[in-house]
Amino acid sequence: MQGNFIEELRWRGMLHDMIPGLEEQLAKEMTTAYIGFDPTAPSLHIGNLAAIMLLKHFQLAGHKPIALVGGATGMIGDPSGKNAEREFLSEQTLRDNQVGIQKQLEKFLDFHSGANSAEVVNNYDWFKEFSFLGFLREAGKFLTVNYMMSKDSVKNRLETGLSFTEFSYQLLQGYDFYHLYKTKNVRLQMGGSDQWGNITTGTEMIRRKEGAGEDETDRAFALTTPLVTKADGTKFGKSESGNVWLDASKTSPYEFYQFWLNTADADVPRLLRVFTLFSQTEIEAMEAEHAEAPHLRILQKALGKEVTTRVHGAQICEEVIEASGILFAKDAIEQLEAASESVFQQLPIYQVSSEAMAECQNLTDLISVGCNNLICSSKGEARKAIQGNAISVNKVKVNNPQANIDFPLLRQKYLLIGNGKQKNYILAIK
């Protein structure tokens, strides 16, 4: 093997639990493992990145990763961590989502590396052939209701209600593991710590269907990684506007980079370990440098550049970094005028229609209703911000709520509106 997968996870803080004997299995031979991804959206989001990085490290250690896109289980919905049942999606929607997800996985995993090439499989391909009675005989017979009721994903939903459809989810996921074990020699399923119950359902189904003894634990294995949380214990992975997506049409590369750049100092050491391939030596050296000059945000910049490059490519990342620097520069106006079109288009640009502009009588109107309450949520808030000297137009402070909006346009079309020190908006005036 090219590296010790378990030791890599340990120093990165990415190991939560595993079935004993896994380290010996990985040392013995190239092993195949899989992680399931829910195709309920056409894109993965950064909440999925820790799982993707598990597969990445697994492949770098010389093993074979499989990403299972749950076309069948996606029709049901995993009850783990959910308070209510999800809406059903059509088969075609799930297929379309799978295509988008595979393209994103290809940015992280090597699908052309010989024996340990990554693969993507869809569990709909084997579940579509099952009849209801056939599945009960093939899977339902091997797990007791008592066993299934003991899982946290079930117990946590008993008070609010759990449909039989969701109750059966762990049977489907357990059978996935069995099917891949039989057809692709998959020996390991991995996932977040909230998936331990579902994963061990699979190891139990394999044990029972294959007739292994109670003490035989080397047939199939489970490994989980801790859920990524912030230093204050809250869930990591969402911005003010919701999920941070890997698809540029859902979260722009600029917003994506800014999300990582704005990471709190208390969180960034762990995020560097989980979401990048920097070595332990490299990270510790950066941490020492950061400690001497925290205001330079060395760790945040390294994190943002690494992840944005992986997801959106090196050229887009460089343009985004250049664009990010422009908005906060002292000579921002000159830089905006001189920036190349490709860099300029990476900036967050918000369209203001000619109809909306016609209804704006002053700056108060423009930064509230004129831009659909993007900058200020109401006219009252806008007046308060202007009078509080928080609003600038083209980097010039304006403190008159009634100020006319006949400001000179940048590049004959744009206004740069600042709200405080951290928020800048470029309005495209039609």
Image (spheres, rainbow, N blue to C red):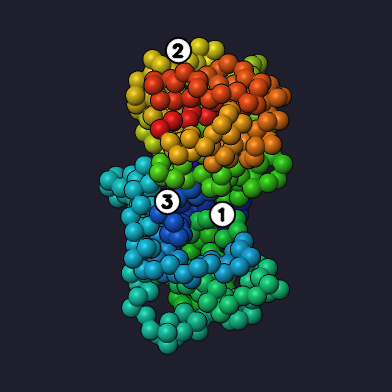
Q: Residue 339 placed where, x, y %?
A: 38, 18
Q: Residue 149 placed where, x, y %?
A: 64, 76
Q: Is residue 336 above or below residue 254?
A: above
Mark 2 neighbour density, 10 Å: few (under 14) some (14–19) many (20 or more): few
Q: Amino acid at mark 1?
A: Gly
Which one is in front, 190 or 187? 190
Q: Which mark is residue 192?
A: 1
Q: Residue 405 placed where, x, y %?
A: 53, 25
Residue at image mark 3: 43
Q: Amino acid at mark 2?
A: Glu
Residue at image mark 2: 334
Rendered residue at 58%/81% (across/down): 144
- Residue extending farthest to the bottom is 133
Which marked residue is nearer to the observer: mark 2 or mark 1?
A: 2
Q: Is residue 3 above or below residue 30?
A: above
* Distance CA(mark 3)–CA(mark 1): 19 Å
Q: Which comes sooner in the sequence, label 3 or label 1?
A: 3
Q: Which comes sooner in the sequence, label 2 or label 3?
A: 3
Q: Is residue 181 above or below residue 410?
A: below
Rendered residue at 46%/69% (across/down): 88
Q: Which comes sooner in the sequence, label 2 or label 1?
A: 1
